[in-house]
Image (tube, rainbow, N blue to C red):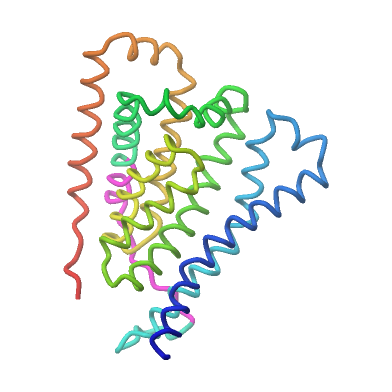
Amino acid sequence: MEQRKNLSKSLWELAMPFLLYVSLNMAIQAALELCFFEFFTVPEHAVWELAVVNGIEIPIFYRMYRESCIREQLEEPEPKRGGKNAVWKRKSRAGRLLLAILGGLFLGRGFNLLIGLTPLPTLFPGYETAADSMYTSSLLSLVAASMVTAPILEELLVRGVLYRNLKGVLQNRYAGMACASLLFGILHGNLVQGLFAFLIGLYLNWIYESEGSLLPAILAHAAVNASTIFLERMPEWQNVLYGSLPLYLAVTAVCLLAGFEIWKKFPLSKEK
């Protein structure tokens, strides 16, 4: 009976943050469109709506992340100094933060180009709605939604809450990383973006586990999104790249090799 109770509790701890995120998204979007119908129902303003929704949810998931940190700290055999009021996070040096950002830039471009070599974008064009927003939305709204609020919210949810819970339940950080990355992909709502999010999510989980802080993952996530925003708005660059297969393959290989070299700079400690 006790084992079944613990299993039910673990399953609830895994499902609740995910369900809360989806429910809050739907409820806040509905409220915004009801209160500000003329503004948020215009397609060009959809990205602003996303930025506002993210901004509202950030404090909620920060609190959830903070409580998870405190609970984990108090459950340790020898609780760290600072008691239940401390939220323990290791500090990352500036050089480590820069490495995390560069890794995000190289891997983000590399995975994006690699997926472009497959038939998936043609077979599953659902990602085009999100891609079109790159051209119809203002640069400021894209920065607010994709480079500021989304990295903070999604890292709090996926790395800070879901991954920590999964690692605890599965008792294996590698399985936790894979499952958290899978959920990260599902959150993106279509196969092409979902596969990309799964791949980059593995890197983000890894550097979070290595550094013990969300900041490197947040900055790397922001860098991934920034590269997409700015490069997709440069048609001249795309025309040159897509017009030459050897150049495309060379850029893909360089980005992936550089990204994986940086990834290796974030070793994991031995599991206890």
Q: Quadrant of the C terminus?
A: bottom left
The relative height of residue 67 versus residue 31 in the rendered view (above or below) is below
Query: Where in the figure is residue 167, as x and y percent of width and height?
Result: 33, 68
Q: Residue at x 29, y 29 (%)?
A: 114
Q: Is residue 196 magenta?
A: no
Q: Is residue 89 magenta?
A: yes
Q: Residue at x 43, y 41 (%)?
A: 194
Residues in magenta, as a range: 85-101
Query: Where in the figure is residue 238, as x and y percent of width and height?
Result: 39, 15
The relative height of residue 11 versus residue 266 in the rendered view (above or below) is below
Q: Which image quadrant for residue 245? A: top left
Query: Where in the figure is residue 184, as x and y percent of width and height?
Result: 43, 50
Q: Which image quadrant for residue 246? A: top left
For residue 64, side relative to residue 257 (left or right): right
Q: Residue at x 56, y 25 (%)?
A: 132
Q: Residue at x 63, y 43 (%)?
A: 50
Q: Is residue 256 or residue 227 the one in the foreground? A: 256
- How many badges with numbers are in the image? 0
Q: Quadrant of the N terminus?
A: bottom left
Query: Where in the figure is residue 261, as x and y percent of width and height?
Result: 17, 41
For residue 14, side relative to residue 173 (left or right): right
For residue 65, side relative to residue 89 (left or right): right
Q: Which image quadrant for residue 211? A: bottom left
The relative height of residue 217 versus residue 128 in the rendered view (above or below) is below
Q: Is residue 207 or residue 93 the one in the foreground? A: 207
